[in-house]
Image (tube, helix red, strand yellow):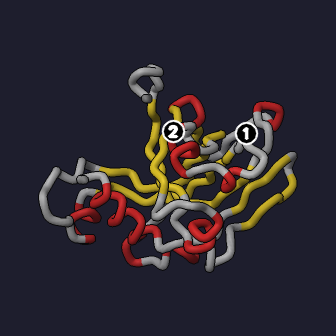
Amino acid sequence: MSERLQLDIGSYKVGATSPATLNRSDSLGPIFGVIPRRLIKTSPAVFDRADWVRNVVEFEIAFQMAEDVPPRRNACTTEKVLDRTRSARVSIEIEDPHIEKPFSQPTETLHVGNGAAGGCVIGPDIPDWRGQELKLIAMTAQANDGTTANGIGLNERPDAIEVLHWTANACMN
């Protein structure tokens, strides 16, 4: 679909990775999507709220790959995926759901409609990211020079390395 629409893909994303989100949806697993290049900015970044219907701010860990994980028949180990990963970075995803109750829709609708991509701010590299508990990385979003959000509950944030490993193997099928 992205090719047909001539969409300039800036990043791939995986949504619905936490147990709480999966419980609210009919999904049997995480949902793949893309973020158009025009919606990605480097921190510090400014977005205009008038560009969105409703915005939801999500604190994320983004990974920059150094090289593709090669296709294979058997699952790739976490270590092999990490060996192909250049860096981990703090990021803030801005979702813009155009549906009043997104989880009332079939998962396929969210996937085909690209869910709710509204924007993404990519922050700095996380130093020594392999040696850190990525769930504990502190992040802050501001609006009009005032703090609006600080991180998310640890029960909502999945283990980012587990999600990266799962994604690499899911994309091979």
Residue type, numbered disc 1 = His
Q: Is residue 6 left or right of 118 when viewed as pictured?
A: left
**Residue 137 can be seen in this image:** no
Helix, strand or loop at disc 1? loop
Q: From the viewer's perspective, is residue 13 above or below residue 158? A: above
- Which residue appears at 59% of the width and 34% of the height? 39
Which residue in the protein does label 2 denote? 112
Q: Nearer the viewer, residue 24 or 52?
A: 24
Q: Nearer the viewer, residue 75 or 84?
A: 75
* Number of dots carrying numbers: 2
**Residue 74 can be seen in this image:** yes
Q: Going from the N terminus, do you reach mark 2 or mark 1 first?
A: 1
Which residue in the protein does label 1 denote? 98
- Which residue appears at 24% of the width and 48% of the height? 67
Real-space Cα separation, disc 2 to disc 1, in angstroms: 14 Å
- Which residue appears at 61% of the width and 61% of the height? 25
